[in-house]
Amino acid sequence: MATRQNGKASDTETRQRLIQAGLRLFGLHGYEATGTRALAQEAGVNLSAILYHFGGKEGLYRAVLEQGISRKLEEVGQGVFTVMAACGNPASTRDDLLAAMGEMVRTMVRVMLGNPESRSFSQIMMQEQIAPTAAFDLFHEGFFSRIHAVWCALLGRLFGMEDCLELRLRALSVMGQLVIFRVGMTGVLRVVGGDKLTDEHLECISRLCIQQVEAMVAGFAPACQDQDPAGGGAPGDGR
């Protein structure tokens, strides 16, 4: 019995070591440029372990994405819950919605910029946008479109706007002002003059992003005329 338990523990450890190796190497080099030998060497396991546990490199890559998406959804969960609760309550005032927006921004800043472990997964997400792999739908449907749908719901309530292309694009513009700090981290650190973002930096970034959304809401006027409310897809599908 002890041998079986030890075997299961060893299998679990091997899987996790390979996933961590994949997270780092896929983030650094991308899917195509990362070889199985490099993955096995990084994890400190036999090459055959990739085939045994994941069926090959593609299976390992999908496991890396699945674990990363699961953790990111858990990390942003409180912010998402607060926004959706406010949006789902017909009695929510503009102040209630703006307060929920502020919590969502601070949550995303903390998750995207304040957690050092987010770097590798963020790099994988960026590479999926630049050079999509067969696993793109897993990332898009599992994470990106869900967060986009949350912003669509919130901005729709704040603007009094039904689903349309403009609403989806406005949601993307809000997400973009946060993502640029992750995508351009090397340049951002050069600007702030440090080797990492401090709590003070993160709070300042949060305040700036919140103020920009508040300004967007205060000065709202439709930018796209004669939009088809259907817009070609459901909110959050990124089309």
Image (cartoon, rainbow, N blue to C red):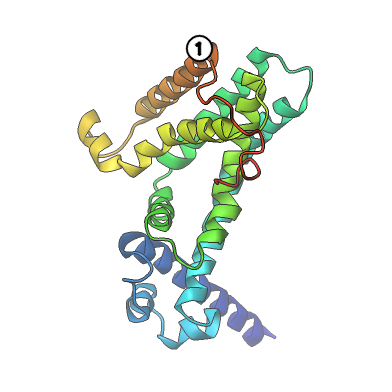
Q: Which residue is mark 1?
A: 219
Q: Is residue 69 visible?
A: yes
Residue extending furthest toward the front: 226
In front of the other: 180 or 119: 180
Question: Residue at point 63% right, 20% down?
Answer: 158
What element does badge 1 sit on?
A: loop
In front of the other: 6 or 161: 161
**In screen coordinates, is 94 left or right of 204?**
right
**In screen coordinates, is 113 left or right of 166?**
left
Q: Given the image, on which type of amino acid does mark 1 rest?
A: Gly
Q: In the image, residue 101 lies at what x, y percent?
A: 58, 25
Write down the quadrant of residue 42 in the picture. bottom left
Q: Is residue 67 visible?
A: no
Residue extending furthest toward the right: 90
Is residue 35 placed above or below 24 in the rendered structure? Answer: below
Q: In the image, residue 108 lies at what x, y percent?
A: 50, 36
Question: Residue at point 65% right, 80% down?
Answer: 5
Q: In the image, residue 86 lies at what x, y percent?
A: 71, 25
- In the rendered picture of this protein, how many numbered marks are placed on residues? 1
